[in-house]
């Protein structure tokens, strides 16, 4: 009964907010109003774009408002914000949404169920060009434009989102601009706080999450104590730490935030460091500001492998569950492996063999990365945010 009452309450709030929004459409579009949204407040592509706007002093000309879940955190940052999911009728949120000139997001489109008026541009920054199928794309085409990193993804995204290819722009991802900035200051924060500079090599392991508290995103076939590929048992993680210690190497695990609460990551290891979102927030860093500190990426189906190609460093793909993952979650092409430009490993022995090569300074896939990077990335520079701002005609003049 309580569940029914809650659902009814949400529906009533939604209806009232829709009425308020419709009334606010009587006001003209504010030609200087920008609204930004990201999955985690102040993160990913939207935040990288925001930092570019601030560096260009666009915040002096435009009113920039964040659509957030945590209003108090926004106040502490000293930024203007509206609540993303109001639990009660919210005239302020609806007024700004109804009158904004640009709504720029990488996760939640607040115009999914709202009428978008002429004069408002909804720009989808999205959160990754990769091979895994996207889920839960209701109202998926309710935007004016979406950006990708290369021509390879243009028709693919048009098909996924059910939109004309003209809506898919090859402008790049703002978060990748961090990879071309002088990272010494941000990397120094990691070095000072965690002493990572004492290691011979640093491996960054960013697995696609397979075990999740969200049943829709939980890969039921995947049975692993650690939630990791290859290293299924806690004892195997201990053995891996021993291997790293013998080779004076560090492995930084950056697991998905839906996976980070697993108990296995609470344990302390000498040569394994689990980088959580809370660590980045404490140091006021974005993930892409620090991934350049690594000498190699270990991943699988995550879109980070596409971005990491810009660093021209070795990539190891853990593909022990390739067939099962393809059937369960789905990949966007049948021959996805052909586009994994790096070491393909399916067990611990294969992983160690690849790491041994990299520890010796070898990079067996450098030539194939160089040959194919242009189809994944039209631009190899740090100007994605500028291209997007120029396209949207957001300027300081």
Image (cartoon, rainbow, N blue to C red):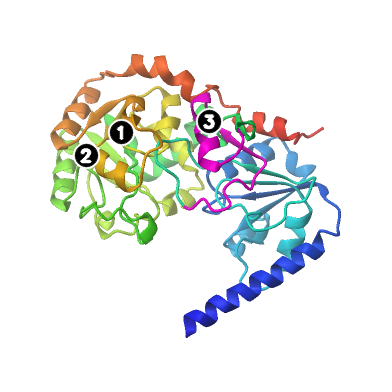
Judge from the rendering whether residue 380 lies leftward or rightward of residue 296; answer left or right: right
Nearer the observer: mark 2 or 3; the answer is 3
Q: Quadrant of residue 208?
A: top left
Would residue 77 be visible to someone looking at this image?
no
| Magenta stretch encompasses residue 151 | yes
Dot 2 crowding, Cα within 10 Å, few <14, some 14–19, many 20+: some
In primary-sequence order, the first of circles 3 and 1 is 3
Percent across and percent down for residue 234 are 17, 52
Residue annotated with mark 3: 155
Q: Which mark is residue 64?
A: none
Q: Quadrant of residue 248?
A: top left
Which of these two is toward me, 68 or 280? 68
Nearer the observer: mark 3 or 1; the answer is 3
Judge from the rendering whether residue 246 lies leftward or rightward of residue 12; answer left or right: left
Q: Is residue 384 above or below residue 270?
A: above
Nearer the observer: mark 1 or 2; the answer is 2
Residue annotated with mark 1: 202
Dot 3 crowding, Cα within 10 Å, few <14, some 14–19, many 20+: some
Magenta range: 136-164
Would residue 33 be visible to someone looking at this image?
yes
Residue annotated with mark 2: 320
Dot 1 crowding, Cα within 10 Å, few <14, some 14–19, many 20+: many
In primary-sequence order, the first of circles 2 and 3 is 3
Say whether marks 1 and 2 touch (CB < 8 Å): no
Percent across and percent down for residue 139 are 58, 52
| Magenta stretch encompasses residue 394 | no
């Amino acid at each position: 009964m309580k569940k029914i009452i809650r659902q009814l309450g949400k529906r009533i709030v939604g209806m009232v907010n829709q009425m308020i929004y419709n009334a606010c459409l009587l006001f003209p579009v504010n030609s200087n109003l920008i609204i930004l949204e990201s999955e985690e407040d102040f993160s990913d592509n939207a935040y990288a774009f925001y930092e570019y706007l601030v560096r260009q002093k666009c915040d002096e000309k435009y009113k920039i408002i964040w659509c957030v879940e945590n209003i108090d955190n926004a106040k502490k940052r000293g930024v203007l914000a509206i609540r993303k999911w109001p639990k009660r009728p919210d005239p302020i949120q609806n007024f700004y949404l109804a009158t904004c000139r640009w709504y720029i997001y990488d996760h939640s489109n607040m115009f999914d169920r709202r009428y978008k008026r002429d004069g408002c541009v909804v720009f989808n920054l999205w959160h990754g060009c990769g091979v895994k199928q996207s889920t839960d794309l209701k109202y998926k085409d309710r935007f004016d434009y979406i950006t990708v990193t290369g021509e390879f993804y243009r028709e693919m995204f048009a098909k996924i989102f059910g939109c004309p290819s003209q809506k898919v722009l090859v402008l790049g991802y703002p978060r990748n601009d961090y990879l071309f900035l002088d990272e010494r200051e941000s990397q120094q924060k990691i070095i000072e706080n965690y002493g990572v500079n004492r290691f011979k090599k640093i491996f960054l392991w960013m697995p696609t999450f397979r075990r999740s508290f969200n049943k829709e995103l939980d890969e039921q076939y995947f049975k692993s104590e650690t939630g990791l590929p290859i290293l299924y048992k806690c004892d195997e993680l201990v053995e891996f730490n021993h291997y790293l210690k013998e080779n004076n190497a560090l492995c930084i695990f950056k697991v998905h935030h839906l996976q980070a609460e697993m108990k296995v990551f609470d344990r302390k290891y000498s040569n394994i460091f689990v980088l959580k979102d809370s660590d980045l927030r404490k140091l006021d860093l974005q993930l892409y500001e620090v991934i350049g500190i690594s000498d190699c990426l270990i991943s699988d189906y995550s879109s980070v492998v596409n971005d990491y190609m810009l660093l021209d460093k070795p990539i190891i793909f853990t593909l022990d569950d390739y067939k099962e993952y393809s059937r369960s979650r789905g990949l966007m092409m049948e021959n996805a492996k052909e586009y994994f430009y790096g070491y393909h490993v399916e067990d611990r022995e294969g992983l160690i063999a690849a790491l041994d090569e990299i520890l010796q300074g070898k990079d067996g896939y450098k030539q194939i990365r160089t040959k194919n990077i242009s189809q994944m990335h039209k631009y190899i520079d740090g100007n994605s945010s500028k291209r997007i701002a120029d396209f949207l005609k957001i300027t300081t003049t």
